[in-house]
Image (cartoon, rainbow, N blue to C red):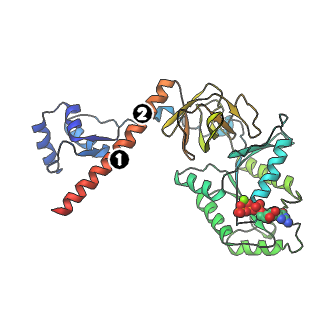
Amino acid sequence: PEFISVGQLATALNVPSRNFDRKLKQLGFGELSHDHVLNSENAGLIAMEFNFEPVVESADDDLRAAPLPEDMSVFPQRPPVVTIMGHVDHGKTTLLDFLRKSSVAANEHGGITQHIGAFNVLLESGKSITFLDTPGHAAFLSMRQRGANVTDIVILVVAADDSVMPQTLEAIKHAKTADVPMIVAINKMDKADAAPERVKSDLARHGVEIEDIGGDTQAVYVSGKTGLGMEELEEAVVTLSEILDHRADPSSSVEGWILESSTKSNGRVATVLVRSGTLRPGDIIVAGATWARVRTLKNEAGALVEEVGPGMPAEVDGWRDQPVAGDELLQAPTEQKATEVVDLRLTKQEQLKMAEDTEAINEARRREQ
Ligand code: GTP
Ligand code: MG
C-alpha cells in the first residue's frame, strides 16, 4: 500500500509509541495523531530512521512483460493501429464504414458487422491494419492522459470542399504533441467543388507539408462515397508502418488496453486491443479494479477467434465487474493473483480517498487556528 497511518507504521516497525512520537518530532513532523495518514515517501523516511529498508509494493509490477530488447527485429511485425481524426462532417464515419465493409468482405466467416471499438482489415497483400472506431479526439485524449500511444498512425481527414477547419487544427495539434505520424486523406474528391490544392496549401500554412509540395507528409485523394483511393490509403498506411517497423513480442505475457466496455445479452463485454503477447480463451486478465477469465474472444464480425496477437482487437467476455475504457490490461498467472491485484488496487483507492479526506480535515483545522 502507498499510504499508512502513524499508528500502523509504529506497529509495523514494532517501536513503542513514545519513542515513535519523539522521533517524529525530531524529524520535524510535529505532533501527529495516530490516525494521521502518511504517504509512502514520508513513511519510508521514518522507517529508515529506525534502520528499516522500506519497500513500496506495487500489486501489478510482476504482471508486466519483461522490458523490451533494444533489437526489436527478433520479433515479428504487427499490424499498425490507426485512428481517424478530422473536422465535423469531413467524412470520418463514412471512410471507416467503407474500410469496415471491405474487412467484412475479406472475412470468410461473414456475419453481421458489429460496431465494436476497433476492427482489423485484412489486405490482399496479407498485411492487415487495425482501425480504432472510437470517437477520434476522445480516444486520443484519454490515451494521452495515460502517457501512452495506443495509436501508431493518425489519418487526418480533410474534406476537399471545405479545407482546413478548427477541428482539423486540433487534430494536427494532438498528433504533433503525441508525436504520432499523420497521413492526410483529402476526402469528398467526387464533389464538383473539390479543391485539393487549396487543402494542401492550407495545411502547409499550419505546419503540415505534403510530399508533392516538398514536405514529408503523404496525402491521398479519396472519396468515402465512391471508394476512390481507398486501396491507396490502405497502402500508404502499410508503407508507413513498414518504415516505422512496428513489432511486438507475441509470446510475452499479455498487455493491452480496454477500448470500450458494455453490457450485452451475453454479459459484460469489453473491446480490447492487445499490445504485447497473445490473448486466448481461458487466460486470466486484470484491468483497473476488475478481472476476467476470458470465456470467448470475438472479432468485429462476431466470429469466435482462438487467439488475438499484438496489434489486434477483440471483444472479450467473462468479466467479474464492468471494466473501464482506457484502462490498461495485464495478464495474471492465476485467479488468485488476479483477485490479489484487484483487492490491492481497491485498497489503494480507498487509502488514497482516506488520505485526501484526512488532508482536507487537517487543512480545515489549520485554517481554524
Ligand atoms: P462527425 O462524426 O459528425 O464529425 O462527421 P464525420 O466526419 O463522421 O462525417 P460523416 O462520415 O458522417 O460524413 C458527413 C457527410 O458527408 C455525410 O452526409 C456523408 O454522406 C458525406 N460524405 C462523406 N464522405 C463523402 C464523400 O467522399 N463524398 C461526398 N460527396 N460526400 C461524403
Ligand atoms: Mg462520424
| Quadrant location of the C terminus in the rendered image | bottom left
Residue 37 in which image quadrant: top left
At which x and y percent is residue 323?
Answer: 55, 40
Q: Residues within 10 Å of mark 1 (few under 14, many from 20)?
A: few
Q: At label 1, which amino acid type do we have?
A: Lys
Find the distance from the CA under tag 2 to the CA under tag 1.
Answer: 15 Å
Tell me if 9 is positioned left or right of 348 in this view: left
Q: Residues within 10 Å of mark 2 (few under 14, many from 20)?
A: some
The residue nearer to you, when weighing 253 against 361, is: 361
Question: What residue lies at 57% left-to-right and 57% top-to-bottom?
Answer: 141
Tell me if 315 is positioned left or right of 222 in this view: left
At which x and y percent is residue 122?
Answer: 81, 41
Query: Which residue appears farthest toward the front when viewing the image?
Result: 265
At which x and y percent is residue 172?
Answer: 66, 65
The residue nearer to you, when weighing 151 against 134, is: 134
Question: What residue lies at 47% left-to-right and 24% top-to-bottom?
Answer: 336
At which x and y percent is residue 224?
Answer: 83, 59
Closer to the N terminus: mark 2 or mark 1? Answer: 2
Figure quadrant, ligand 1: bottom right
Residue 283 in which image quadrant: top right
Residue behind mark 2: 343
Please determine whether, in this image, residue 99 is positioned above or below residue 68: below
Residue behind mark 1: 353
Question: What residue lies at 35% left-to-right and 37% top-to-bottom?
Answer: 1
Say what secondary structure mark 1 lies in.
Answer: helix
Q: Is mark 2 within 8 Å of ligand 2?
A: no
Say what secondary structure mark 2 lies in.
Answer: helix
Please determine whether, in this image, residue 230 is positioned above or below residue 313: below
Is residue 324 shown to the viewer in this render?
A: yes
Q: Which mark is residue 178?
A: none
